Image: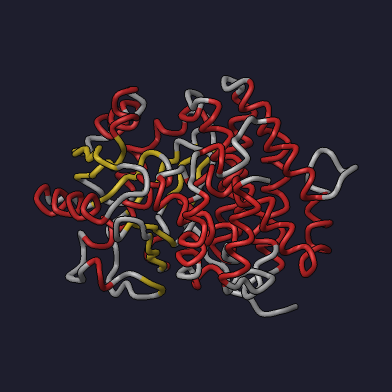
Amino acid sequence: MAALEFQTTRRIISGPGSVSRVGALAQELGIRHALVVTDAGLCASGLHLSCMASLAAGEIRASLYSDVVADPPEDVVLAAVQMAHDARIDGVIGFGGGSSMDVAKVIAVLANSKQKISEIYGVGNVRSKRLPLIQVPTTAGTGSEVTPIAIITTGETTKTGIVSPELLPDIALLDARLTLNLPPHVTAATGIDAMVHAIEAYTSKIRKNSYSDLLAREALRLLAANLVTAVENGSNLEARSNMLYGAMLAGQAFANAPVAAVHALAYPLGGHYHISHGLSNSLMLPHVLRFNTPVAGRLYEELGGCLPDTGQDFVTQMENLIDRVKIPKTLRELKIPVTDLSMLARDAMLQQRLLVNNPRAVTESDALKLYESAWDS
């Protein structure tokens, strides 16, 4: 057996209604004053109230930071860290999608550190222990609750990763009832995002391993079997539970066998046009799959067995699934100027942290051809 190293969140709790345990779990971690990190939309919906009520029942003081936005910029993170310092919080709870959970990770590190945020970008640069951290996802997509990664927008159009075992939370709490109110288009995009995590983990060039393979296949099976139902009938709790669990498994897989070219080409789309991460991944997925097929075709055939329709090749199966959940398929539909494609290709080349994991080397010329294919496929 080949040598491997596998890391994940220390404790995972899954089940409808489990958000009611947040207060007791915070007590177990020794938290007395928690900062709950979320976004304004969730607060407006009142979805966070169950979390706040559980903390109150556990006699945990709670402050609320609700200014997280998609693709969170550095100033949002630093404002949250300042709030954590001012309030003297001693624990952090991320409540929301990937952006809220990523911000929560960085707060948990910087609120207990003398390092500046600029010093922790990259891989393995966190030098201090973080505060206790609980993550409660409200979307089935990013898997951030089980990954040692946070992505921050560091310029007008650029994103930078922070990668460290210290970003793995103490507890991931999966309550599918929190995902019942997701709109169909969000369910579709986040679901495809999770599937991309599983696919790219399974074909990751450098750290692919037997353990991540098991997780990736099971994640893909669960996600593919439940995505259409979750999109078409968002109140189906079983489908929602399977999606949330599948996204978590995919997160565990890619946290250890990292993602690659789909994500590298998706990041500039989000940075320049504020296209959601899941949609960006979906737009680039079929084109990168076709590009990789000469090298990764056997692996794609193996993954094809995880999808419901095994009568077609893997790329076609994924395209059909994207069609069924009504996700836009071309960059042209989103009014991205064709004259911008060269710029996008240059920006994608900055994502070498991801591109080195791709089963086939990607040049700037390749990236441009991939964007051209995605513009009008």
Identify the residue shown where x is 50% and y is 62%: 342
- Compare residues 261 and 123 and report the one nearer the observer: 261
Do we see residue 145 in this rendering? no
Coloured how? secondary structure
- Compare residues 188 and 123 and report the one nearer the observer: 188
Identify the residue shown where x is 34% and y is 22%: 45
In this view, the residue farthest toward the front is 339
Q: Position of residue 38 (x, y in %)?
A: 31, 39
Q: Position of residue 66 (x, y in %)?
A: 25, 37
Q: Position of residue 182 (x, y in %)?
A: 49, 27
- Compare residues 346 and 303 and report the one nearer the observer: 346
Does residue 75 appear to the left or right of 72 in the view shown? left
Identify the residue shown where x is 52% and y is 50%: 338
- Residue 113 lies, with reference to residue 89, above or below; the image says below
Q: Position of residue 193 (x, y in %)?
A: 57, 46
Do we see residue 48 in this rendering? yes
Does residue 146 appear to the left or right of 292 in the view shown? left
- Residue 134 lies, with reference to residue 239, above or below; the image says below
Identify the residue shown where x is 26% and y is 73%: 119
- Residue 13 lies, with reference to residue 240, above or below; the image says below
- Compare residues 159 and 182 and report the one nearer the observer: 159
Tell me the quadrant of the picture where the N terminus can be found: bottom right
All told, the count of numbered labels is 0
In this view, the residue farthest toward the left is 86
